[in-house]
Amino acid sequence: MDTPLRKNSDTPLRNVRPNIVQSIRAYRIPDLQAAAETLGAHFLYANLAHAQTKADILELLATQFHLPAHFGKNWDALYDCLTDPIHKAGQQPGFVVVLDQIPTTPKFDKEVREQLLDAFRDAADYWAERKVPFRCFYSFL
């Protein structure tokens, strides 16, 4: 007998921890989007290929994630936008986030890339405490 729970367990995310930030590896973006739809989760996608700096990344995330106009364009404000207003909106079904083509430029070096990913790791921890899946996948340019 095929139940909705079985269908959910057959998604490409069945072997991915519910709260994690990881390399996109073998996952394809359309498959992640389809999995989010199957699970009823929010799907957030940002293509960061044209960014050169931290400011560029934050601007692209603000635009592509439709962050509020008051977004402060820093790591703390990003974390706040990924957690607080959404939590206050009520019960959440979960999240699948894709950060596609994070730059590897001199002005967006390893330390700054880690700060970006740390904001998403902190958001994953926040949602884990509330038993809400938050899976973030990323790739580098």
Image (tube, rainbow, N blue to C red):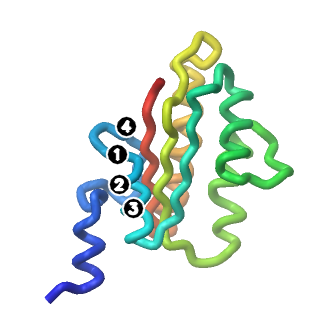
Q: Residue furthest top?
A: 106
Mark 4 or mark 3: whose residue is earlier in sequence: 4
> Which residue corresponds to the image point at 34% horizontal and 45% vertical from the top-left?
28
Q: Secondary structure at mark 4?
A: strand
Label 3 is placed on what type of residue?
A: Ala
Determine whether label 3 and label 2 are within 8 Å by CB. yes
Quick check: 37 left or right of 103?
A: left
**Does residue 77 sit above or below 92 in this rendering?**
above
Give the residue number, with chain letter if any, for mark 1: 28
**Does residue 74 sit above or below 66 in this rendering?**
above
Label 4 is placed on what type of residue?
A: Ser
- Tag of residue 34: 3
Q: Residue furthest bottom?
A: 1
Mark 1 or mark 3: whose residue is earlier in sequence: 1
**Percent of width and height locating residue 140:** 45, 27
Q: Secondary structure at mark 1?
A: loop
**Percent of width and height locating residue 70:** 85, 50
**Percent of width and height locating residue 97:** 50, 51
Picture quarter containing residue 108? top right
- Tag of residue 31: 2
> Which residue corresponds to the image point at 81% horizontal and 42% vertical from the top-left?
72
Label 2 is placed on what type of residue?
A: Asp
Q: CA distance from mark 4 to mark 3?
A: 18 Å
| Residue count near mark 3 (Cα–Cα under 10 Å), binned few <14, some 14–19, many ≥20 | some
